[in-house]
Structure formats: C-alpha cells, structure tokens
Amino acid sequence: MRLRSIELEVPDPEAAVGFLASTWGLLDAGSRNGVSYLRGTEALPYVVSLAKADTRAIAAVTFSGAASEVAQARSRASLAGARVGPMRAFDEPGGGEGFVLEGPEGQVFRLVCDRDRVEKLPADRDRPLQVTHVVINARDREACTRFLIEVLGFRLSDRTGFMNFIRCDDVHHAIAYAQSGISSLNHIAFEMEDFDAVMRGIGRLKDAGLAPAWGPGRHGPGNNVFGYFVTPFGATVEYTAEVQRVGDDYKVGGPEDWKWPPNRMDHWGVSGRDSAALSEAEKQFRFRKPVM
Ligand SMILES: [Fe+2]
C-alpha cells in the first residue's frame, strides 16, 4: 500500500490549480466532472485533485495498492467495525476500484486499486515527484494512530511530544497525526528529487513572492529536508527530499528520543518559523462528510 493522492475542495479551484501548476511545479493530469487533477513525475495518475465547493475541505486522502491488498484492508476494516463503503469504481485518472473508509475523527480515507497504469515522466528537479506524506491534526492522535495500525495494518515509525509518524511502506511516514484542538489538514508534503531541488523550489517560490513559513531545515523523525509554504488557496504545502526509508527492524522512537535543544526546531538550527501563519492555515481544511 502506498500514499497516492489527496482530494481537496476549494471555492476557487482555478486559482488553486494555477498556483500548483505554474508556481509549485505540478503537471496537468486532466479534468473530468468538473474536478481538476494534477500529477508529479512519478508513475501515478494524479497526486492532487481540486473540486469546487463553497467551503475549503479535504474530500479524501487516497492510498493505492494491489487488488488483494485493497480487498484485505476492506475486510479487516469491516471486521474492526469501522465505517466502510461498498467496493466501487472511481471515475478519475487511473480509474480502478476501491472503497471509502471513515476514521475516528471523520477522516476520509480511500483505498484504491488503480486500473490504468501511467508512465513515469523524465525526472525534473523543478517538479515534485509525488505526495510523500499528509499530516493531519487530530484531537486524539493516539486513537487515530491505533485505527491506522489496527484497521489498515500500517506501522508506527516514531512518536514525538506532539506528533505520531505512521508508514504504510518503506517511507518513514505517509501519514502523521499532530496533536491539536481540531481535526484538520496540517500540511501536504511533496517529494522533490533531492536537496538541491528543494532549495531551487524555495527560490522559485521566492520569485513568486512567497517566503517559507518554515525552513529550509532538516527534520528529526524522517530526517528529511524541508521548506513549508502557506499557499494562496489556504493550505500549507511542503517541499521535501531525502525522506528516510525504513525496514521492519526500524526502532520506534519515543518523545525522549526526539528532544531538541532550546531554541531549535530542526537539525540545522537555521530555520525561521511563522507559527501564526501556519496555525491559521491549519484551520482552513477540515474533512467533509464522506460520500461512501
Ligand atoms: Fe512534513
């Protein structure tokens, strides 16, 4: 199973698509039924979709896997008493069959087996490869974490004083839950080819008049380099690279393993952080009621 895409709703999808394509570097993956799709250079049909709605919302976070993995996840989720939709076809790039699953705080997850393969595009350091993780704010991060582990068979990679990092393959985290008073989108991370591509991205955003809300820096858990931006359409996005790959032998870290010295929020200690802008952005995207 792997993280594939995030489906968003915004009042002005054209503006959001414009930003994500022209400035952020994603590529047009077509549109259908009024929904716009954007992709990276990896062999995935799309990584972000944008639909028009009155209020901003996350419609879903989507994982893709083999048909057997999707079927197994569905029976496991049903057995666990989770709210699970029927198996159905999805009319979107990649097509395929899957189901919708509701998390403990109304999170909407989709598990899909893509039908149509798409070709990987030539690597381009000015374009994201794919979405590598989504961080979700949660009122009860432990309960939300247990759900992904017990219902979907995901693995805990690390816990800090305020975040849990969860993986579904060898990437250190696909989902992280940040402890919060609300359940909402914290940020979406786009994997870039390398460290240099992250820095070039930060420069490109600077040219477009956007300073990083946090970064550049190097994270503790996952050891990835990062630069965060609050987009004009309200969501926080991250350019990242060098995300740690882990195996079954990875030792789960706890809060004691991830303590920073005073006045430090990353390995390098050079990053500034606009906490006010980031926390305002965290209020913008809640999960909308799932369409099962
Ligand atoms: Fe991140």
Image: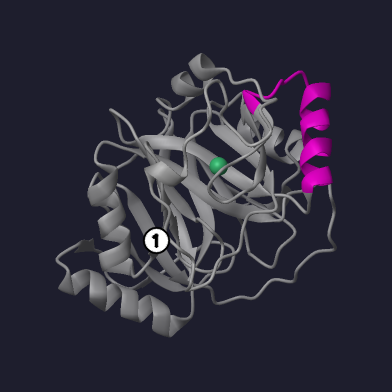
Residue 257 x %, y %: 45, 46
CB at disc 1 and ligand 1 closer than 8 Å: no
Q: Can residue 291 be seen in this view?
A: no
Q: Can residue 268 be seen in this view?
A: yes
The residue depicted at 56 percent of the width and 62 percent of the height is 171
Q: Residue 106 in magenta?
A: no
- Identify residue for label 1: 110
The residue depicted at 51 percent of the width and 37 percent of the height is 187
Residue 190 x %, y %: 64, 47
Q: Residue 213 in magenta?
A: yes
Q: How crowded is mark 1: few (under 14 residues within 10 Å), some or many (20 or more)?
A: many
Asked if residue 233 is positioned above or below residue 290 in the image, the reply reads above
Residue 9 x %, y %: 47, 38
- State whether the magenta stretch is mostly helix, strand or loop: helix
Residue 42 in which image quadrant = bottom right
* Displayed-image quarter of ligand 1: top right
Give left or right: position of 138 versus 17: left
Colour pattern of the rendering: one colour
